[in-house]
Image (cartoon, coloured by chain):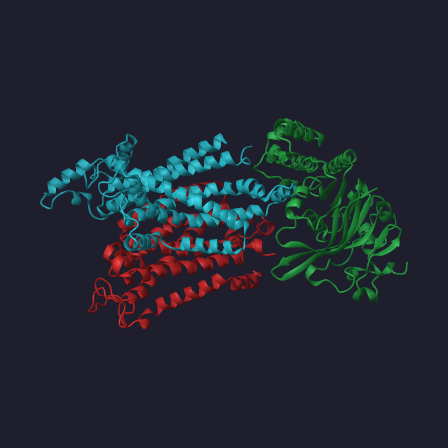
Amino acid sequence: MDTLLTVDNLQVAFNTDDGEIVGVENVGFNIKKGEVLCIVGESGCGKSVTALSLMGLLGKNGFIKQGDAFFDGHDLRSLSSEEMRKLRGNRFSMIFQEPMTSLNPVLTVGRQLLEPVELHLGLKGEAAKKLCIEWLEKVGIPRPEKVFSDYPGTLSGGMRQRVMIAMAMICSPSLLIADEPTTALDVTIQSQILDLMEELRLESESSILLITHDLGVVAETADRVLVMYAGQVVEEADVFELFENPQHPYTKGLLASIPNVSDDFTERLKSIPGNVPSLQNMPKGCRFCERCSFSMDVCKTEVPPLFDVFPNHKMRCWLGDNK
Amino acid sequence: MRNQLRKRLLITIPILLFVTLFNFILISLAPGDPVDAFFNPNATAADLEAKRASLGLDKPMIYQYFVWLGNVLHGDFGYSYSSYEPVTKILSYRIGPTLLLMGISMLVAYIIAIPIGIISATKQYSALDHTVTGLSFIGISVPSFFFGLFGIFIFSLNLHWLPTGGMYSLGKAADFGDRVKHLILPVAVLSLSISGKMVRYVRSSMLDVLNQDYLRTARAKGLKEVIVIGRHALKNALIPIITVIGLDIPLLIGGAVVTEQIFQWPGIGQLTIQSINSRDYPVLMAINLLSALFVVASNLLTDLAYRIVDPRIKE
Amino acid sequence: MDNSNSVWRRFLRHKPAMIGSIVFALIVLSAIFAPLLTPYSPYELSQSFEAAPSSEHILGTDLVSRDVFTRLLYGSRVSLLVGVGTVIVYVIIGGILGTLAGYFGGWVDSLIMRFTDIIMSFPFFIVILVMVSILGPAMSNIIFALGVLGWPPIARIIRGSILTIKNQDYIKAGRVLGYSDLRLIFKHILPNIMAPILVNATFGVSNAIIAESSLSFLGMGVQPPRSSWGNILTDAQSMTILAHEPWLWVPAGLMIVITVLSVNFIGDGLRDALDPKKIQ
């Protein structure tokens, strides 16, 4: 399969009142055409920042400090903001965590859906409207003609996320970035939305970069998985490999903390002790070492590189050094 | 929505009753007797008594109020104590100039304040933003009479560009250019008194909107920044501002009193001061009712506009 | 509150607010120590009428030969008293009504809020003009009139804050523990709504100062011979004074602007420092 997106050694920083803060560093991955890559990690680990930086949506204070990002032959870092804008919503698009606030409350669903169609596809009038209604139908919205002229306030969270998906997919992008698309939704709605995304992906052969903290979602959707911790990638593997043969102590901890129906209920749920270090005072060596039960002397002083522990399986841990 | 509106309409009645009753009680507390101002000092006590009876002033205050109210409902505001003309006639001369002054001032204030507030918010913490916030602070801190005097001092007395006051020069009542010249300073003063506040409102409302998720969505679609701001942000930011416009009206009436006094603008504001000085209570009562009506009506209108513009209110 | 330290630090970092505080402190001090700062009394007549500034009278003399600088100093007392007095009156009225409405709810709430709506629909300035002209243009009456009509925003702020706080768990817990309503109001609710009240009150001071000076300017406020910045400016309605004797009106106007500006800066700094959205 061809590679669609290549990210290498990405570092994202923010200007704050207290100086520059690095939010994400040493992030690298590939997404092949038609593949689903999941980035998983706790909130604040830098997964959303990674996605927003690729979209060029970091806001005034954030910027990519170093690294490379190639998307479908475009060097994203060398594109002007105008060229970037033309790709956004067109060749790659994004949906967000909060469907309740992600749609503009004072513009109709139709108006918001028409925007990318008119802008990127150049369709006008009835043809544009017809496409929008087709898509509303495709994402499972009942009475699409009516919803087209309604305001988002009349829709439930699940329905709004469907609208968001239609909006993101309507120009048939080759990459969809979905940032916690189901987190704010009820469990039953969650799986419907994931099924819908999977269905659309198969149909359009686009790739998905799915960001989540939910390992259940990962297991259900991912081809490959990237585990992030405190602004760094700590492990990368195929989904089956990762679940069956986790290597990094943090990944093991994450997997152990999933409750299982077959578990002995007299036992307490496992959790990882301690807290994520803050961006302002990162440890000198491995960022996980203070919470890690395998911690060695070298972990406190030296930052571990990404070791290839198995074919197609990397991890950032000194335990991988001798393998 | 219709129910809510009916409720709003119904509440205007107690508001108007309360405002007029409040003023009526206040005026009945006034020391001195309006009849004193009426007659020459040679009038006998019996003459005064007769006059008082003819004005209904010998009856209890509450009775007088209902008589007044009954007359008002028939369109009769009584006669001015000082010029003996019907109050309605006096008001009819005065209302036009005031509406002209207030209308143009509001228009000018919003035309200037709204774009400036928006631009300032989109360029938060820039030099432009700091200048705008600084100037808006000065705008809300300079009393309008001082600003007016300063304007006269510079543009009338030193530069001789503009007249010091009045609505038109003698014999030039029909000259449009002359009218405009007379309007410039009063309009500048009155619009400044509300635009400083408006700039701050627009800016903070816009800043709120700029942090909303739906703007990120709009950008993620690849929309041009002009459309992100002009279509997605602007409409959301302007809706709360409609309410503020309604709240500005009482402020504007107060500003009009001061402005008209400084520039001898022959409107309701100047009439208020004259009527207070001459204890012309029928005129004062009418002015109070009229301005309360104006406030209530504008509140109702902004409420209505808000409901029409904001789709979130419809259920 | 345990974040009072950081609030204070944010306030100190707010440059305009610090400048405003210093200027305002200077104005308050000069109002208090006015007799020490000038050899004249504000009512004392001199030999010269409408004299231009000189070493003897640094801001000249007025129409009846009194020292303008002295009258400015004493005039600051009026502005400050009216500004602070008005706010005290309306915070008390608004505080009581807002607390009653928010805490008891039901018909008490709707009655008080309808009344608040009514007062907010008053053509504020015209009613105050009538009030002051009938009660007599004394300083106490100005404070009374401005206070009696100025309370609705405070009442609304307090009612709104109480409604949100009332449903929070620690207040419910207090009720379950059997604390009396009054105790709950004063011990738990009021400390939590001090921030918005403080900010509103600060801007209230500057609004009252402007209102008083406007009334006095129109001749409906503080009456001569007592001096107020507003009534000093009344003389400038004469075109000769306006054109040729700027010392009679420019300093008084500037004093109003400087004072109001410094109070507004303090208010802005307080708002930024107390804004919970900025506390993270």
Q: Residue at x 57, y 61 (%)?
A: C3
The number of callouts visible is: 0
Quadrant location, the C terminus of chain B: top right
C48 lies left or right of A165:
left
- In the rendering, at what x and y percent does residue A36 appear? 79, 42
Q: Nearer the viewer, residue A114 or A256?
A: A114
Can you say whether B36 is above or below B127 in the image?
A: above
- In the rendering, at what x and y percent does residue B202 appear? 49, 47
Q: The chain shown in green is which?
A: A
Q: Is residue C280 visible?
A: yes
Q: Nearer the viewer, residue C168 or B244?
A: B244
Can you say whether B245 is above or below C225 in the image?
A: above
Q: The chain shown in cyan is which?
A: B
B232 lies left or right of A225:
left
Instruction: Please identify the residue farthest to the right as the structure is shown.
Output: A323
Can you say whether C278 is above or below B286 in the image?
A: below
Q: Nearer the viewer, residue B274 or A256?
A: B274
Q: Is residue C130 visible?
A: no
- In the rendering, at what x and y percent does residue A89 appear? 67, 40
Q: The chain shown in red is which?
A: C
In the picture, residue A317 is in which quadrant? bottom right
Q: Residue at x 57, y 47 (%)?
A: B210
In the picture, residue A12 is in which quadrant? bottom right
- In the rendering, at what x and y percent does residue B46 appear? 11, 40
Q: Nearer the viewer, residue C15 or C196?
A: C15
